[in-house]
């Protein structure tokens, strides 16, 4: 197994700041917008973006949540492994809000399809957008595209994109791993 670094700490910081600026351009003060990190891998990205957004003087209110997709996925019954659900933490109403789903890697689009189904349990959003750190653009199974993209990556099927965060892995980096 070999791996190649796609992004290092400085590049990730630049991308996060650019994504935060794009969110501010489109959502201004975030009074009608919430960020929802998709469990498990979108959570750290959501926290990082929230930290950057909270530094902006015009943003004094920011709702951030976590959404578990485990039992909404179309492939959850296809494995012999016992599934362990993550927690969902949405302590606000999404009814008539602009919801921004946040995930680390957009691959086939199946997680986003599951998120679209799962969020309906919390209300009917006004709009839903997707923010993804990495867009694996040639691997889509469903017609889903990110509104906000950190970086596009061309990876073939035997390659994986792994995102490491200093809080969980000791470093900020994105790797392309080949089996």
Image (cartoon, rainbow, N blue to C red):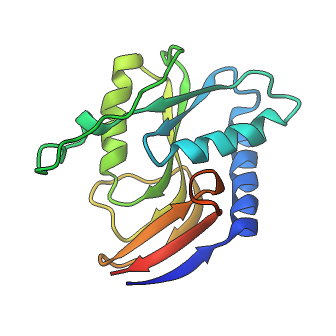
Q: Position of residue 55 (x, y in %)?
A: 84, 36
Residue 107: x percent and y percent? 38, 60
Give the quarter of the figure containing the N terminus.
bottom left
Give me the residue at 48% from left, 15% from top. Answer: 95
- Which residue is rendered at x = 76% and y = 27% of the image? 29
Residue in the picture at 53% in, 69% down: 152
**Foreground: 141 or 67?**
67
The quarter of the picture where residue 138 lies is bottom left
Compared with 179, 35 (above or below) is above
Furthest residue toward right: 57
Quarter-wise, where is residue 2 in the image?
bottom left
Residue at point 72% right, 46% down? 20
Residue 105 visible to the viewer = yes
Q: Where the C terminus falls, by quadrant?
A: bottom left
Q: Does residue 174 appear left or right of residue 79 in this picture?
A: right
- Looking at the image, is 100 positioned above or below residue 136? above
Residue 123 horizontal side relative to residue 146, left or right:
left
Q: Nearer the viewer, residue 13 or 21?
A: 13
List x then y, in percent, for residue 144. 38, 52
């Amino acid at each position: 197994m070999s791996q190649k670094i796609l992004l290092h700490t400085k590049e990730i910081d630049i991308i996060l700041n650019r994504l935060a600026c794009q969110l501010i351009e489109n959502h201004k003060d975030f009074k009608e917008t919430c960020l929802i990190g998709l469990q498990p891998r979108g959570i750290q990205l959501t926290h990082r973006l929230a930290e950057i957004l909270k530094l902006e003087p015009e943003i004094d209110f920011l709702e951030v949540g976590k959404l578990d997709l485990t039992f909404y996925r179309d492939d959850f019954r296809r494995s012999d492994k016992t599934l362990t659900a993550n927690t969902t933490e949405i302590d606000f109403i999404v009814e008539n809000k602009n919801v921004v789903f946040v995930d680390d890697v957009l691959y086939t689009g199946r997680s986003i399809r599951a998120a679209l189904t799962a969020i309906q349990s919390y209300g009917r959003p006004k709009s839903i957008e997707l923010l993804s750190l990495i867009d694996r653009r040639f691997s889509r199974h469903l017609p889903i595209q990110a509104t906000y993209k950190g970086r596009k990556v061309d990876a073939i099927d035997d390659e994986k994109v792994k995102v490491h965060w200093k809080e969980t892995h000791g470093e900020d980096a994105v790797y392309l791993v080949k089996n």
